């Protein structure tokens, strides 16, 4: 009987067994649903649930990020965990990135993406005059005649690949294979939040693989916009640097969530540095009147780059000699902090002569000094400026590269930003246009291609 008793199943036991079975089945369904939902939100969970991670990118991708006026050293003004993550896991120019001369925004941003010095790519200042026509260039001019050379987005488009640019200088210019395509090329609008810019770039990685840009340029106005108002040492700069760091964090997080952070190359840099200026460091051109008169309508820019274009018929050599005579006399206040040159006699390292757009007389002031036409009454003002000799350390910015071709934790010597074009074309494994960078430079900074 005993064996018959254990083999048989009572109604009560049947009910208990059915309840346990239902509970276990329900638990399994809830767990599976939870895992599935999490997998939709997190690609790493999805990868674990469905096997090995599949590489999403069919080709190398570079995101080039510019933080305008990010002077080398700003990364130490406040905790910048995201920037330092790129530094620690990537390659950094140990003492900063050297800008081209003049150290202005538009010449440098266009040098970065063309590999050309301003005399070669044509954007010799933020504003200038075309001498043959008298036509005036400003940042809003997008006709191809101003923008020479071949920028990276055009180079990439020439290879049949997609490129994107969010507010980079020159990106709205339609030339070659680049037509500033909708969705990949944004019309400049400074009011667009930084977050929206980052999220737009991230959204490209949600597209089918053949629509993901091989190259994307991303621009932020800060901390430059604050630096001009308060100089490089104000608390407003510290806050601006922290905000840029948070944007880099947003970019990293978005790439990680899409499972592509380690496959994408991120290059973070700036176009120039910043130095404090005050009204007690001003040279007035009217003070040179005993030696030579420099009318205001001769002056195309005052500082930090003094650019003078006298009308035809004037002896340029004589004007330069008389200006320097007065500046060296000791009778012009702060005069010894300005040196004037015929452009052909500027130091060759500046590469600032071989363009007819460059005015024939160029003056260079000492760090932190400014030039004005005449003395005026008014309150003493201090702020910040750039545009000075690129030899000044204060004009340097940052360069940080993170990605498959950049060694982790590596420091490299400082270099000029005209080298970056060849670095990016090397990473993308595409043929670049002729430029002023060294063809061998990428080998000194990149790991061999896998």
Image (cartoon, rainbow, N blue to C red):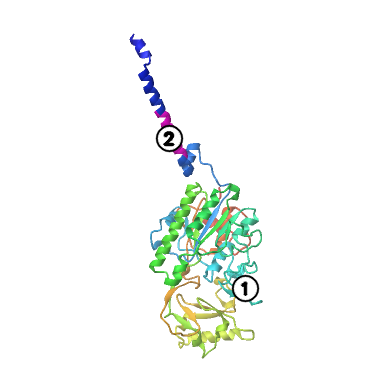
Q: Residue furthest bottom?
A: 290
The verdict on residue 19 being magenta is no
The verdict on residue 31 being magenta is yes
Q: Give the x, y percent position of residue 350.
A: 55, 71
Find numbered disc 1 in the image and state the secondary structure of the residue it sits on. loop
Could you say which is closer to the camera, residue 200 or residue 218?
Answer: 200
Q: Give the x, y percent position of residue 423.
A: 56, 57
Q: Residue furthest top?
A: 1
Question: Residue placed at 66% from the left, 61% from the top?
Answer: 176
Could you say which is closer to the camera, residue 78 or residue 398?
Answer: 78
Residue 110 found in image quarter: bottom right
Q: How far is mark 1 from mark 2, CA to CA?
A: 71 Å
Return the disc, 1 or 2, that comes first in the chain's sequence.
Answer: 2
Could you say which is closer to the camera, residue 182 or residue 222?
Answer: 182
Residue range of the region highlighted in magenta in the rendering = 23-36
Question: Residue placed at 62% from the left, 84% from the top?
Answer: 311
Q: Which residue is mark 1?
A: 355
Q: Which mark is residue 30?
A: 2
Residue 139 found in image quarter: bottom right
How would you classify the magenta stretch by its main secondary structure?
Answer: helix
Residue 422 found in image quarter: bottom right
The reply to whether callout 1 and callout 2 are in contact (CB within 8 Å) is: no
Mark 1 vs mark 2, foreground winner is: 2
Q: Give the x, y percent position of residue 369.
A: 46, 77
Count of numbered tags: 2
Q: Give the x, y percent position of residue 137.
A: 60, 72
Classify 425 as above or below 19: below
Could you say which is closer to the camera, residue 355 or residue 301?
Answer: 301
């Amino acid at each position: 009987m005993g064996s018959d008793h254990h083999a048989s199943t009572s109604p009560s036991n049947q009910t208990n067994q059915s309840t346990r079975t239902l509970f276990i089945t329900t638990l399994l369904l809830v767990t599976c649903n939870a895992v599935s939902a999490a997998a939709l939100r997190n690609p790493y969970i999805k990868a674990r649930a469905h096997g090995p991670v599949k590489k999403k990118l069919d080709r190398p991708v570079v995101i080039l990020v510019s933080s305008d006026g990010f002077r080398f050293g700003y990364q130490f003004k406040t905790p910048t965990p995201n920037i330092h993550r790129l530094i620690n896991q990537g390659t950094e120019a140990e003492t900063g990135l050297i800008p081209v001369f003049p150290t202005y925004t538009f010449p440098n941003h266009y040098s970065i993406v063309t590999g050309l010095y301003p005399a070669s790519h044509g954007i010799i200042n933020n504003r200038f005059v075309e001498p043959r026509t008298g036509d005036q260039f400003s940042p809003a001019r997008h006709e191809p005649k101003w923008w020479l050379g071949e920028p990276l987005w055009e180079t990439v488009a020439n290879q049949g690949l997609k490129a994107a640019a969010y507010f980079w200088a020159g990106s709205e210019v339609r030339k070659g294979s680049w037509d500033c395509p909708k969705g990949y090329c944004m019309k400049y609008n400074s009011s667009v939040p930084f977050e929206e810019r980052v999220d737009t770039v991230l959204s490209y990685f949600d597209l089918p693989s053949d629509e993901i840009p091989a190259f994307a340029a991303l621009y932020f106005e800060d901390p430059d916009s604050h630096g001009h108002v308060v100089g490089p040492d104000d608390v407003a700069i510290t806050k601006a640097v922290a905000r840029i760091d948070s944007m880099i964090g947003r970019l990293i997080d978005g790439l990680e969530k899409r499972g592509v952070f380690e496959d994408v190359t991120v290059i973070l840099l700036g176009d120039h540095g910043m130095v404090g200026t005050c009204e007690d460091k001003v040279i007035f051109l009217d003070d040179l009147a005993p030696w030579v008169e420099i009318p205001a309508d001769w002056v195309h820019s005052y500082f930090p780059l003094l650019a003078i274009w006298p009308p035809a018929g004037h002896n340029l050599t004589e004007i330069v000699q008389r200006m320097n005579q007065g500046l060296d006399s000791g009778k012009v206040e702060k005069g010894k902090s300005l040196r004037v040159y015929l452009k052909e006699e500027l130091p060759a390292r500046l590469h600032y002569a071989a363009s007819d757009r460059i005015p024939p007389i160029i003056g260079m002031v000492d760090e932190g000094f400014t030039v004005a036409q005449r003395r005026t009454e008014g309150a003493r003002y201090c702020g910040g400026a750039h545009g000075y000799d690129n030899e000044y350390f204060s004009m340097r910015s940052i360069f940080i590269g993170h990605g498959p071709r950049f060694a982790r934790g590596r420091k490299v010597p400082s270099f000029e930003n005209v080298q970056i074009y060849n670095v990016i074309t090397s990473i993308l494994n595409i043929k670049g246009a002729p430029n002023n960078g060294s063809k061998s430079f990428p080998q000194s900074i990149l790991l061999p291609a896998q």
